[in-house]
Image (cartoon, grey):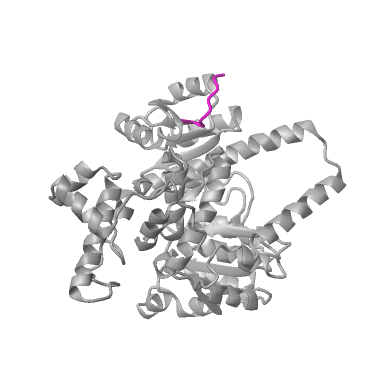
Amino acid sequence: MTTSQRPILLCVDDEVRSLETLERTLDEEFDVLTANSADLALELLRSHDVQVILCDQRMPDRTGVELLTEVRDRWPQVARLILSGYTDSEDIIKGLNEAGILQYITKPWHPESLLMIIRSACRMCALQSENALLNMEMRLTEEQAEQQVSEKKAHLRNSFQLEEIKRHAQSPLNKICDQVSKIAPYDVSVLITGPSGAGKELFARALHYNSLRSDRPFVVENCGAMPDELLASELFGHKKGSFTGAITDHVGLFEQADGGTIFLDEIGEISPAFQVKLLRVLQEREIRRLGEQQRRKVNVRVVASTNRDLEEEVRAGRFRQDLYFRLAEVTLELPALSRRTIDIPVLANSFLQTAMHQFDKPVKGFSEEAIACMKRYSWPGNVRELQNEVRRMLVMCEGEWLTADLLNPRVLRAAPGGEDEDIDMFAGLEGTLKEKVELLEKRILRETLIRHRWNKSSASLELGLSRVGLRSKLERYELEKSGDSETSKQH
């Protein structure tokens, strides 16, 4: 078997253009192998130490599920993902049950989302391999196993304590954390609202690990864009033979979470028909697996989240009012990152510490200029986008500091309030008109120089200035490159 420092990813698709697109998207981070047939894929698996296989479902020689079923039997350690333009529930269920796929990814896919899924799959594969080695090296006694479980639970509880949520001392999140501390001990349903990437799952976990249920399971289900039959199977379970592909009994997440908490993400996406089923479960506190008549009592706390305005959805008749009131005994409203810019330096430095440890790449920190640019950007992807940006900056960095020129161009170009908003160009500037114009000119000069990595020839060309004219303005506004000599500011 060959070895590689980077994770090896095998992409299987009978369409050559699809393979080329996948390879271009993924080859900066992974060693990408491609196969346009199942036979070639099996040959590559025999000769390479593949961590993840990403397979199209519809292929002429055999389906993705059929190929991944064989992969599961012969190379169970390989993480298996299916990529398909079809969302047939039968295909999805067969993939989950027969091929043991980790995730079913629908086309068209978003590059950043696909990268995050594959990173997670690689991490899971590495952890499984490490766990298998540990199991081979030692035989745990019952007492040792109990101790380890206890230590892991304690670690989880500590990780999700409210004081561990990264934020500024005057953060708007302080009020939300106070709410969580008040409601966590009580068995009330909680609805967490806010834009995607704002940290809704983080607060759902904080609710669980600060509650009396913290020793019991916490399970998560993303309800968005999932067929009703598959969602019912995942949440309530099914009996063997209840539908095509149900080859074994399956315990649903409500049963798995018994005594603990279930987090229903993107609850606003479920269909009206499924809303009725979920309401009955919440009212009766019992579930019935697909294909059987027996009802099973469950004792779970429900935390749900959405980026929709559910009150408006209720008024529009798209969401049941009685279900809304069941889910929203207490509502937590998470603000977008653009509404709490005071937290950006704290979050960025926290993400940087984690990334430095993960990549084994130490730096001194961020330049003041980089922090200032990040605080001016609107971050439509919220905390998740900021985390990805910090990781990218660290990967691209060649010096001791993460300077502003490492930022994505869209971050550098952003005006306060975001690129797409119709804003007053003088918003946030104080003084006379002349002073405002000078401040705006200084900002434009600085941002242009940052984009051009302080190359004055390129910057002067974009600005329509001569080098002498640019130099004069830099002296006038006392602008000079900053970064390497700066200390990282812990705001």
What residue is at 47 percent from the left and 42 percent from the top? 400
314 relative position to 277: left or right? left
Residue 24: horizontal and vertical position, in percent?
Answer: 34, 34
Residue 4, placed above or below residue 379: above
From the viewer's side, name the closer residue of 454 and 324. Answer: 454
Answer whether residue 105 is visible to the viewer in this image.
Answer: no
339 relative position to 180: left or right? left
Residue 94, placed above or below residue 172: above
Q: Main secondary structure of the magenta part?
A: loop
What residue is at 38 percent from the left and 59 percent from the top? 372
Answer whether residue 394 is visible to the viewer in this image.
Answer: yes
Residue 41, placed above or below residue 350: above
From the viewer's side, name the closer residue of 357 and 265. Answer: 357
In magenta, the rendered stretch is 1-9
Which image quadrant for residue 160? bottom right
Residue 108: horizontal and vertical position, in percent?
Answer: 34, 46
Residue 172: horizontal and vertical position, in percent?
Answer: 49, 73
Residue 273: horizontal and vertical position, in percent?
Answer: 45, 67
Residue 316, placed above or below residue 460: below
